[in-house]
C-alpha cells in the first residue's frame, strides 16, 4: 500500500535527482519543509476526543500556555465547525466522526448501542485493521460506545482498553490520560511499528448536563481536559525526541452544550439545533507539516476525520465517504488561512453560525425526542425505582419485602418491554425523517477467515455479526452501552 509519505518521499528523491527539489503537484502548502527523516519514520496518529466541549469556552478559559488546547492550536490548524442540520447527540455524532459518513447513511439516532451500523458502515478501527493489520490500533475510553465500536465488524482494534476506575468523570479522564501517556511512551520501545490511538475524555459533557455550558463546573472541566491534553502532548514530544518519529494529532468534539440550567442541578445540555448545541471543532496537526502551525481552516468538518486518518496510513478511501482527507483535498487546502489573531478569528467564525432551516430544525427535534425515549426509560427512569425497591427487599421485612420483590419483577419486565417499544418507535421515526436511508455503495468488508488473526469466534457468530440487511425496526433486543455512573441527559435526546 502506498502512503502519502511514500509518495512524497519518492517525489522528493526524484526532485533532488533532477536538481529541482520540487514537491508533488497539489501537495499541501508547507509540505516542502518536510524532512527526509520524517518521511522514513513510522506513522503515528493520535485522535483525541472530548465530549460536548464548546470551542468558545476553550478560547475563554483554556487559551493559554498551561493548556493542551492552546499547545495543539499552536502546532496545527484549527477549525470552528458546526453540525447544524445533523443530530447534536453523542452517539450519532461520534458515529459520524469514526465512520466518515453522516447520519442519513449510518442511521445512528440515539445512545442505544447497536452493532449493525458499524458492520454496514465500517469504523476507522475496522478499516485500518482490514487494510493494514500491522498498524497497532488502540482505544482508551471509559465509555462503552467506543470499546464496543472497536470490537465489532470482524476486524477489532488490537488494544481495547475500557477504563472503569474513578468515582467521577474527571477521575476517569485522569486514568484515561495516564493510560494514553503510557501507551505513547511505549512506542519508543518499538519505533518501527505504526500506531493509531484514540483517547476519549468525558468530563466536560457531564458538567454541561449537570450544571450547563455556562457554569463554573463546565469551565473547570474544560480547564481539566486542557491540562490532561497538555500531559499527553508532552508525552508525544518525548516520544518524538526519543525516536525521531513525528506524530499526526487530531482533536475533536462531537457537539456543544446549552448555556443555561433547565432545573437546579440539571441542564438539558444538547440534542437540538441551537448554535451552542451544534458547536464543534477540529484541530489537525499533520506530522512534518510545521509551515501551517497556528493556521485556521474555514472548511474542515467532523466527518473528514476518518478519511484523514486512513490517508495517513495509505489506506484507500471508500467511494461513499461524506468526508475527505484534510491533508490533501484541494478544497480544504484552499480554505486554510493565517489570521493575525487566531483567537479572534475563531470567535468570529463561531458567531457566524446559525440555525438550519425551519423544516430541518423541526425534523431533527422530532427525531431527537423520539430516538431518546427508549434510552431514557431504560437507563434513567427504571433503575432508580428498581434500586429503591431493592433496598426494601434487602431489609427482609415480613410480607413487605416479598411484595417489593414482586413489584420489582413487574417493573423490570413491563418497563423493559415499554423501553423496547419506545426504542423501536424512535428508530421508525428516525428512518421516516431520513436517518439511515442511504445504503452504501461499497461492498462490505469480507469476513475474516477462520484461523486468521482477526477471527475470534464461530462462523455462525461472525455471520450474525455481519448483518448487511436494511435495519429491522421490529428487532428490540439491543444491548445498551455502558455509561459512567453520572447523570447524562443524552438520555433525553439520544
Image: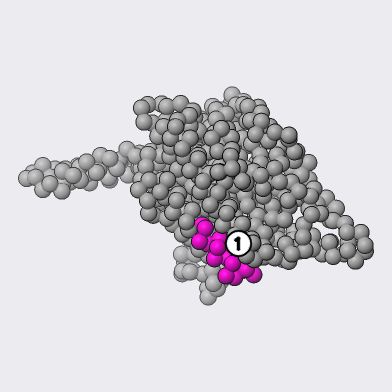
Q: Residue furthest left?
A: 398
Note whether 106 is above or below 461 in the view shown: above
Give the residue displayed 41% in from the left and 26% down from the top. 262
Note whether 135 is above or below 229 in the view shown: below
Between residue 157 and residue 168, name the one nearer to us.
Answer: 168
Q: Is residue 468 visible to us here? A: no
Is residue 441 shown left or right of residue 372?
right
- Which residue is under mark 1? 239
Q: Residue furthest top?
A: 358
Instruction: State the count of labels.
Output: 1
Give the residue displayed 50% in from the left and 61% down from the top. 182
Q: Is residue 173 visible to us here? A: yes
Is residue 395 shown left or right of residue 230?
left
Q: Position of residue 471 (x, y in %)?
A: 51, 48
Q: Position of residue 466 (x, y in %)?
A: 53, 59
| Residue segment shown in magenta | 180-196
Give the residue displayed 59% in from the left and 43% down from the top. 65
Between residue 426 and residue 261, name the one nearer to us.
Answer: 261
Amino acid at each position: 500500500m502506498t502512503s502519502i509519505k511514500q509518495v512524497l518521499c519518492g517525489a522528493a528523491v526524484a526532485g533532488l535527482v533532477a536538481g529541482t527539489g520540487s514537491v508533488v503537484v497539489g501537495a499541501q502548502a508547507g509540505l516542502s519543509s518536510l524532512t527526509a527523516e520524517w518521511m522514513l519514520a513510522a506513522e503515528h496518529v493520535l485522535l483525541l476526543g472530548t465530549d460536548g466541549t464548546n470551542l468558545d469556552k476553550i478560547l475563554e478559559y483554556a487559551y493559554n500556555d498551561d493548556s493542551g488546547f492552546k499547545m495543539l492550536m499552536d502546532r496545527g490548524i484549527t477549525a470552528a465547525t458546526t453540525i447544524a442540520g445533523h443530530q447534536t447527540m453523542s452517539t450519532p455524532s461520534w458515529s459520524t466522526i469514526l465512520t466518515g459518513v453522516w447520519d442519513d447513511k449510518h442511521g445512528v439516532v440515539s445512545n442505544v448501542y447497536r452493532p449493525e451500523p458499524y458492520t454496514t458502515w465500517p469504523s476507522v478501527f475496522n478499516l485500518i485493521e482490514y487494510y493494514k493489520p500491522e498498524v497497532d490500533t488502540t482505544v482508551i475510553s471509559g465509555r462503552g460506545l467506543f470499546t464496543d465500536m472497536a470490537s465489532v465488524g470482524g476486524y477489532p482494534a488490537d488494544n481495547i482498553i475500557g477504563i472503569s476506575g474513578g468515582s467521577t468523570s474527571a477521575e476517569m479522564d485522569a486514568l484515561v490520560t495516564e493510560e494514553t501517556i503510557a501507551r505513547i511512551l511505549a512506542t519508543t520501545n518499538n519505533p518501527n511499528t505504526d500506531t493509531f490511538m484514540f483517547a476519549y475524555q468525558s468530563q466536560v459533557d457531564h458538567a454541561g448536563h449537570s450544571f450547563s455550558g455556562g457554569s463554573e463546573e463546565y469551565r473547570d472541566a474544560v480547564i481539566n481536559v486542557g491540562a490532561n491534553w497538555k500531559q499527553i502532548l508532552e508525552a508525544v514530544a518525548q516520544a518524538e525526541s526519543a525516536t525521531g518519529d513525528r506524530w499526526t494529532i487530531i482533536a475533536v468534539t462531537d457537539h456543544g452544550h446549552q448555556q443555561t440550567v433547565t432545573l437546579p442541578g440539571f441542564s438539558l445540555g444538547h440534542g437540538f439545533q441551537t448554535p451552542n448545541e451544534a458547536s464543534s471543532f477540529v484541530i489537525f496537526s499533520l506530522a512534518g507539516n510545521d509551515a501551517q502551525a497556528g493556521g485556521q481552516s474555514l472548511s474542515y468538518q467532523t466527518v473528514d476525520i476518518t478519511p484523514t486518518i486512513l490517508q495517513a496510513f495509505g489506506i484507500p478511501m471508500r467511494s461513499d465517504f461524506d468526508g475527505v482527507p484534510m491533508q490533501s483535498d484541494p478544497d480544504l487546502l484552499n480554505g486554510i488561512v493565517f489570521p493575525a489573531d487566531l483567537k479572534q478569528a475563531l470567535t468570529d467564525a463561531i458567531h457566524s453560525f446559525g440555525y438550519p432551516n425551519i423544516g430541518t430544525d423541526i425534523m431533527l427535534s422530532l427525531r431527537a425526542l423520539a430516538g431518546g425515549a427508549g434510552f431514557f426509560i431504560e437507563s434513567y427512569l427504571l433503575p432508580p425505582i428498581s434500586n429503591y425497591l431493592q433496598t426494601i427487599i434487602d431489609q427482609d421485612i415480613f410480607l413487605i419485602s416479598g411484595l417489593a420483590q414482586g413489584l420489582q419483577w413487574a417493573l423490570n419486565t413491563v418497563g423493559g418491554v415499554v423501553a423496547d417499544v419506545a426504542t423501536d418507535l424512535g428508530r421508525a421515526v428516525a428512518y421516516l425523517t431520513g436517518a439511515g436511508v442511504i445504503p452504501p455503495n461499497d461492498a462490505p468488508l469480507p469476513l475474516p477467515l477462520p484461523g486468521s488473526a482477526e477471527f475470534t469466534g464461530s462462523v455462525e457468530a461472525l455471520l450474525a455479526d455481519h448483518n448487511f440487511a436494511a435495519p429491522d425496526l421490529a428487532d428490540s433486543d439491543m444491548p445498551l452501552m455502558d455509561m459512567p455512573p453520572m447523570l447524562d441527559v443524552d438520555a433525553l435526546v439520544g
